[in-house]
Image (spheres, helix red, strand yellow):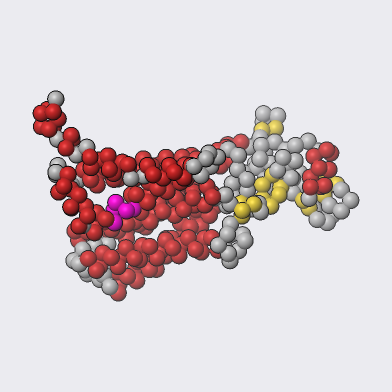
Amino acid sequence: MSMLSGHASTTQPACLGFCGRTLLLGNHSEDVATATSTSDSTFSRCGPCSFGYRSNAASICESCDNPLQPYDWMYLLFVALLPLLLHMQFIRTARKYCRTRYYEVSEYLCVVLENVIACVIAVLIYPPRFSFFLNGCEKTGIKEWYPACYNPRIGYTKTMRCTYEVVFPLYSITFIHHIILIAAILILRSTLYCVLLYKAYNGKPFYSAIVSVPLLAVIHSIFSGVIFYSFPYILLIGSLWAMCLHLALEGKRPLKEMIVRLVTSPTHWVFLSITMLMLSFGVIALITPLEIAYRWTLLCVVPVPFIFYLLTIPFSNPTTTMRLS
């Protein structure tokens, strides 16, 4: 392929935008008459690459056979966690309609199962198929997420359509995950409601989950490139906001009483554990691309916001602040 790429690059000018030339085997294509020829193969005109391919520096469409980088896997994990956490929040807000904790826990487990099934199937159907590894294309910038905005114009009059998935498979696999997730919700959650939660639970979490998945797909279709490069900051800000809001809802309590309440309540334990994990995830995603020594020591800052909040509780009371001043 390297010899063919070099030959094509010397006999034909590079394609514009993200367009590329496809290697055609045989002489039965209608593009052969105008294609670049070699002894055993031909190259098509400039155009969009096939699914799972992208153009290289020589404007030749090459298969995306590079293993995904750790940052890419963390982005996919972030995309998978969004509906999971959102659907859990829907269940939490509907807690007042639940008769017993048993029904609530059963729906939490169903939500986890739905998302696990969607993630596993989505990964297995992408190359290399039926394995828990993914191959993809190399990425260099945010513009590769929006190839439709970079279609070349020939003579300022004709637009050459070269829109395809340049960042394969990060863009399309999210839609596959959402489609499988909707199917899993319709099957598993409906079965759970009909068998176990019939007339015993409110259906708002189910309908909210069904509506939220298409909305997440629309957001991904528009802001996927922005989210890819900013999701560590989204995790950091979101987890800090959720932690502060959760602790603030406990009201103005003395430090000792607040600690006892947090330690003895399973609900607080679970919620704070999730926020700590999300905060750790954001820090890991942020420092993974960095090539600095002892970068993993930055994980020590994860519990700092929680400790800082507890230590500053006495100073958040206006009467205490006025007395100290």
Q: Position of residue 94 (x, y in %)?
A: 24, 57
Q: Could you tell me which residue is drawn at 82 percent across and 49 percent down?
A: 42
Across and down, in percent, residue 76 comes to 49, 52
Q: Quadrant of the C terminus?
A: top left
| Quadrant of the rendered image containing residue 309 | top left
Q: Which of 101 and 297 lies nearest the eye of the viewer?
A: 297
Which x, y percent locates residue 273? Answer: 32, 53
Q: Quick check: is 7 in the magenta stretch?
A: no
Position of residue 264 in the picture relative to residue 216 (left or right):
left
Nearest the viewer among 265 and 11 is 265
User: Start and end of the magenta stretch?
Assistant: 270-274
Q: Main secondary structure of the magenta part?
A: helix
In magenta stretch: residue 271 = yes
Q: Is residue 126 above or below residue 142?
A: below
Rendered location of residue 311, percent (x, y): 22, 40
Residue 47 in view (yes/no): no
Q: Residue furthest top?
A: 325
| Whether residue 22 is visible | yes
Residue 150 to residue 48: above or below? above
Most extreme residue toward the bottom, as rendered?
195
Which residue is at 62% across, 45% downward?
138
Q: Left or right: 169 with respect to 268? A: right
229 with respect to 315 (left or right): right
Residue at 46% x, 56% y: name it.
Answer: 178
Residue that lies at the very extreme toward the right in this rendered image: 39
Q: Residue at x 84, y 54 (%)?
A: 27
